[in-house]
Image (cartoon, rainbow, N blue to C red):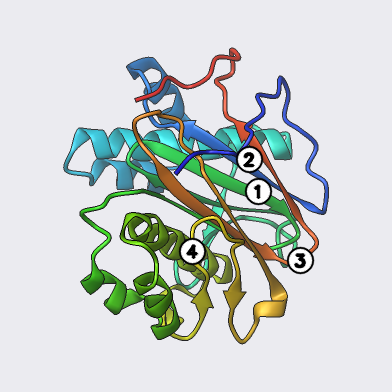
Amino acid sequence: MNSTTEWASPLATPELAPGEIHVWRASLSADEAMLRSFEATLADQERERARRFIFARDRDRYIAARGVLRDLLGKYRRRAPESIEFVYGPFGKPDIASAAPRPEIRFNLSHSHGLVVVAIGREREVGIDVELIRPDFASEAIAKRYFSAKEIDELSKLPAELRTEGFFLCWTRKEAYIKAKGDGLQIPLDSFDVSLSPGRPATLSSVDEPRWGIKSLAPSLISERHYAAAIVAEGKDWTARYFEWKTSDGAAQAED
């Protein structure tokens, strides 16, 4: 998948307009000093979860992902990253703790094989998913288990050389929709359809389709790796802007 997404590197946190979704990407490769800095901003619950990882690489990537998320949310809310408190929906979707019935700033994050993406919107639910494109995972058996009949049919009609990409376009679009709704796997995976043909616009067909907009993006940071990603957000009237996350000294995260 060749990236045509343009990622800006702003010197300051950009203003988040009501009709925008801001998408940030970052590598999860971090040195010890940065990991310690990230970990210092985490809540006790997050540190406890980090300690439960068996492998150090997974632990470090979790800490880096949460650290990047807290850094971003702190800048948008003009607060210290460690002061951000999260609440979780019944199926685990996080929100910023707020005295208001619904927080103004909404967000979602996803990470895969060393890359994290964060979507941030204002007063609209949002979901995002990113996956490393892996031919060994994109099997017919997995498609039959998780895709709808319409999606399986569309996938089967693709030329063989496009099926792996089509598989991950489908996977990320379905995941982003589920995450935006916040209902987890209470939503039957065959109860809605997404398009998956490479080079064609992302579409969603569901009982609540008028509520949502959907986009795909190519977020690769690393030339020899290719990722698929998708965003789903409330409304049809939003546009996405794409940004590269930088450390506080202005340097971009090192690539894996």
Q: 87 and 159: which one is in front?
A: 159
Q: Residue furthest left?
A: 54
Q: Give amino acid for label 2.
A: Leu
Would residue 108 appear left or right of 51 to someone viewing this image?
right
Q: Give amino acid for label 3.
A: Lys
- Sequence-wise, the earlier of marks 4 and 1 is 1
Q: CA distance from mark 4 to mark 1?
A: 27 Å
Q: Which residue is disc 2 drawn over?
A: 73
- Label 4 sits on a secondary structure element that is loop
Task: Check the picture and name the quadrant holding the N terminus.
Answer: top left
Q: Residue at x 63, y 40 (%)?
A: 73
Question: Where's residue 129, x and y in %?
Answer: 47, 55
8 in relation to 215, above or below = above
Question: Where's residue 205, x and y in %?
Answer: 59, 79
- Mark nearest the camera among 1 and 2 is 1
- Sequence-wise, the earlier of marks 2 and 4 is 2
Q: Which residue is disc 1 drawn over?
A: 120
Looking at the image, do the residues carrying marks 1 and 2 touch, with CB atoms under 8 Å apart?
A: yes
Q: Which residue is disc 3 drawn over?
A: 236
Would residue 130 appear left or right of 98 to someone viewing this image?
left
Q: Give amino acid for label 4.
A: Ser
Q: Which residue is disc 4 drawn over?
A: 197
156 in relation to 78, above or below = below
- Sequence-wise, the earlier of marks 4 and 3 is 4
Q: CA distance from mark 2 to mark 4?
A: 34 Å
Q: Residues within 10 Å of mark 1 (few under 14, many from 20)?
A: many
Q: CA distance from mark 3 to mark 2?
A: 24 Å
